[in-house]
Image (spheres, coloured by chain):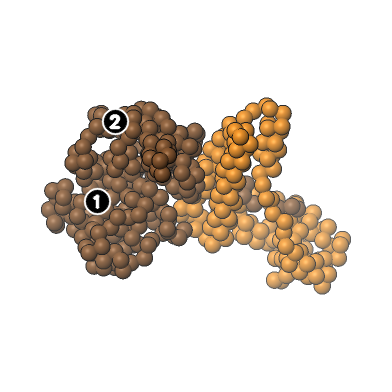
């Protein structure tokens, strides 16, 4: 929540409710809605850290009055550092990897059986994502790229499962 | 659903360099009418051999093939040719297009051979080339168009007689992601109109469009995934993005 708010404030001062709306407009199909309380708590924390400051009040005629916030130089600095820092990705379905290793080590189940179930799940997920790609209301660029990214990850997962099966069966049948 | 095709203990052995190679070692496969089946597996697992046998392009060493309620594994070449003309469309991995005929003639030929009028053949061909985005190539010989376009020509040719069964060997093998989507759209469309599709692919993305994905290894079917053709809720999107707050 922290950096998205800083990023929105980098384009100009805004009050909490506007920030909530900006967030939802950008991320709505793939991030859950945020409550305005969460936004204000984050703004208070950012203010305490010196990344934003209050910039007067908007008179809406309603009580309570809404505080406008603006980004500080420190805030811009922190945003810049965050934005340019490369992100470490999740490389494997770690839970599944753990199950596979344990099943094999302890002789609890044949790896091929676990792989079979995992493959079906991955193929079903691929199916679902491909359906979403075609959904008329999800045709904006951000959403399409996000789904395409997930599709490529699943393809890699499936290829890795093939590799696991190939190598593990080679070892079992010398 | 009723059964369209079934194999019983199908085997195929080849002789290569004085060695006997078992390409298929007992395949039992039943395909329902209207089903979309994808077959995956490493190269050499026997998946292309299986398609060849299902399409009557090769003779099994032992076992049975039933199609549309009758046994077809003992049929001669001429009887298979009739079957392929009317009921089984076959899309080859190597396309097998006729070099000195235009794209349009290549596609229309099976329709004419099946007894359709030239007008009807042209109508069907125009519809397919439009759907597949190869209208502009109609007058060209196959040698003058790209591999991906040749692939789509081969698909149009396999579909022109609206066969009950479409067999396709790597139908998207040479295509970029955009053309892959076009071809998949055509296959799905054919399937939704009731045509049965059996294809071989190494692309999980293509396989994920099927009702059932079979996995082959060493000449046998070793695994099967049944997929639900559901329309996912867009909640799925929320699971795609995880953010550390």
Residue B116 drawn above or below residue B45: below
Residue positioned 28% across, 40% down in the render: B56
Residue A78 drawn above or below residue B67: below
Q: Chain of mark 1?
A: B
Residue positioned 66% across, 58% down in the render: A23
Residue positioned 74% across, 52% down in the render: B244
Residue contact at pointers 2 and 1, CB within 8 angstroms: no
In the image, which disc is placed on residue B66? 2
The percent position of residue B203, horizontal first and vertical second, equals 48, 49
User: Can residue B217 be seen at all in this image of the molecule?
Assistant: yes
Question: Which image quarter: residue B31?
Answer: top left
Residue A58 drawn above or below residue B204: below
The percent position of residue A39, horizontal first and vertical second, equals 74, 55
B70 displayed left or right of A88: left
Tag count: 2
Q: Split into 4 quadrants, where in the image is the C terminus of chain A?
A: top right
What shade does chain A have?
orange
Which of marks 1 and 2 precedes in the sequence? Answer: 2
User: Can residue B32 be seen at all in this image of the molecule?
Assistant: no
Give the distance between the C-alpha atoms of the residues marked 2 and 1, in whole angstroms. 24 Å
Q: Split into 4 quadrants, where in the image is the N terminus of chain A?
A: bottom right
The percent position of residue B136, horizontal first and vertical second, equals 29, 68
Name the element at disc 2.
strand
In the image, which disc is placed on residue B160? 1
B27 displayed left or right of B236: left
Residue positioned 56% across, 53% down in the render: A152
Instruction: Specify few, some or many for label 2: CA neighbours under 10 Å numbering under 14, 14-19, or 20 or more.
Output: some
Mark 2 vs mark 1: same chain?
Answer: yes
> Which lettered chain is shown in brown?
B
Please state which of the two labelled residues, at mark 2 or mark 1, is closer to the viewer: 2
């Amino acid at each position: 929540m922290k950096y998205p708010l800083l990023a929105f404030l980098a384009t100009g001062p805004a009050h909490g409710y506007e920030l909530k709306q900006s967030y939802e407009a950008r991320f709505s199909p793939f991030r859950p809605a945020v409550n305005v309380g969460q936004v204000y708590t984050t703004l208070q924390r950012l203010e305490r850290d010196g990344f934003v400051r209050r910039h007067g009040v908007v008179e809406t005629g309603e009580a309570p009055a809404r505080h406008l916030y603006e980004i500080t130089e420190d805030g811009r600095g922190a945003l810049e550092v965050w934005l340019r820092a490369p992100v470490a990705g999740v490389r494997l379905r770690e839970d599944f990897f753990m199950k596979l290793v344990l099943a094999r080590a302890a002789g609890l189940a044949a790896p091929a059986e676990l792989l079979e179930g995992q493959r079906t799940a991955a193929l079903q997920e691929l199916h679902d994502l491909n359906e979403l790609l075609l959904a008329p209301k999800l045709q904006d660029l951000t959403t399409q790229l996000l789904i395409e990214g997930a599709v490529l990850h699943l393809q890699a997962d499936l290829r890795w499962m093939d590799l696991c099966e190939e190598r593990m069966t080679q070892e079992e049948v010398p | 659903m009723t059964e369209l095709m079934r194999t019983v203990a199908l085997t195929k052995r080849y002789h290569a360099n004085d060695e006997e190679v078992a390409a298929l070692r007992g395949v039992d496969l039943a395909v329902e009418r209207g089903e979309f089946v994808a077959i995956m597996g490493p190269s050499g697992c026997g998946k292309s051999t299986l398609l060849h046998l299902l399409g009557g392009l090769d003779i099994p060493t032992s076992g049975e093939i039933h199609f549309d309620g009758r046994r077809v594994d003992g049929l001669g070449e001429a009887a298979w040719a009739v079957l392929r003309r009317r009921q089984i469309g076959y899309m080859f991995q190597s396309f097998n297009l006729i070099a000195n005929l235009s794209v349009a003639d290549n596609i229309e030929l099976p329709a004419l051979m099946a007894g359709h009028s030239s007008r009807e053949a042209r109508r069907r061909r125009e519809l397919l080339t439009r759907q597949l985005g190869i209208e502009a190539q109609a007058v060209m010989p196959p040698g003058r168009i790209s591999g991906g376009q040749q692939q789509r020509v081969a698909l149009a040719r396999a579909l022109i007689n609206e066969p009950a069964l479409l067999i396709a060997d790597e139908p998207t093998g040479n295509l970029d992601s955009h053309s892959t989507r076009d071809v998949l759209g055509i296959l799905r469309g054919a399937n939704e109109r009731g045509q049965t599709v059996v294809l071989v692919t190494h692309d999980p993305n293509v396989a994920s469009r099927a009702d059932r994905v079979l996995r082959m290894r060493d000449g046998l079917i070793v695994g099967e995934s049944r997929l639900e053709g559901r329309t996912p809720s867009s909640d799925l999107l929320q699971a795609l993005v995880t953010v550390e707050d």
